[in-house]
Image: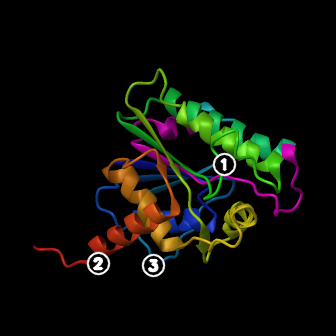
Amino acid sequence: MKLIIAGATGLLGAEIIRQSLEIPEITQVVALSHETVHLDECIDSSKVRSVVIDDYGEYPDDVKAEFAGADACIWTVALTPLQPGFDFAKAKRVCQDYTKLGFEAMCEAGPARPFRFIYLSAEGTPRGPKKDPVILPDFFLIWRKTELMVQRFPKGKEGVEVCIARPGVIANSTTWSRTLVANLFRIINRFGRTLPSIQRSELAAAVLNQARDGIEKRTLLNADLVRLGRRELKFRSAPRLS
């Protein structure tokens, strides 16, 4: 299978790439990012194609050509309120516009069928209009609208499947700020509920499992991702019969 990883130079994206190289069924990896992806020299990177773009909202024909025949995409591109230079206009552009334009570019390129699109969100993002958060409501409204938008992606597109992954706090990852903010509002609203968490390796294994084997359900909560990730890692570590 051919896999696209958007946001490939982040720590989560890098872990997804590293693990994808251990999966025989994944024969091509398109690593989409603002910078060239560099892997350790000891790693066989022959099936990785590093595709550099200046803007996640613009896809020249040569970039679209790299998407052709893709079986799945794992989309990790995001912006959080704790990042330098944060503003809501930029957050909307990154979370909503970039996701939509990236998905459309992949569909225009002629992906395989089925084509699975897995979007990384965060545990605690409100889905219903009556569950507005008490902190950073404008930001979480953007994230909620993005999730609802992704859910509509398959409409009118035969063979397209979507999944929204909602991890809690991601251990050992620079994406911790995104999930921490999401969980802060859950604590405020629910009076001290324990923060859900997941290891970066477990999250990468979980979304790779869904990209390869099929989507279990359209929204995967942190507990689902931990379960899937641990199962996948255990399966890979088990001795294989020759």
- Specify the color scheme: rainbow
- In percent of width and height, residue 41 lies at 50, 76
Badge 3 crowding class, 10 Å Cα cut-off, few under 14, some 14 to 19, many 20 or more, is few
Badge 2 crowding class, 10 Å Cα cut-off, few under 14, some 14 to 19, many 20 or more, is few
Query: How far is disc 1 from disc 2 in space, using C-alphas?
Result: 36 Å
- In percent of width and height, residue 128 lies at 64, 41
Residue 161 visible here: yes
Q: What residue did someone put label 2 on?
A: 237
- Amino acid type for the residue under numbered disc 2: Ser
Determine whether label 3 and label 1 are within 8 Å by CB.
no
Q: Secondary structure at mark 2?
A: helix
161 vs 194, left or right, is left
Q: Residue furthest front?
A: 191
Q: Nearer the viewer, residue 117 or 225?
A: 225
Q: Residue at x 82, y 58 (%)?
A: 81
| Sequence order check, earlier mark of 1 and 2 | 1
Q: Residue furthest left?
A: 242
Q: Nearer the viewer, residue 3 or 122?
A: 122
Q: Which mark is residue 42?
A: 3
Which of discs 3 and 2 lies nearer the camera? The answer is 2
Q: Residue at x 53, y 72 (%)?
A: 198
Query: How far is disc 3 from disc 2 in space, using C-alphas?
Result: 20 Å
Q: Residue at x 64, y 71 (%)?
A: 193
Q: What residue did someone put label 1 on?
A: 126
- Amino acid type for the residue under numbered disc 3: Cys
Residue 232 against residue 128 in the figure, above or below: below
- In percent of width and height, residue 84 lies at 87, 62
| Sequence order check, earlier mark of 3 and 2 | 3
- Bounds of the magenta segment: 63-88
Residue 56 visible here: no
Determine whether label 3 and label 2 are within 8 Å by CB.
no
Which of discs 1 and 2 lies nearer the camera? The answer is 1
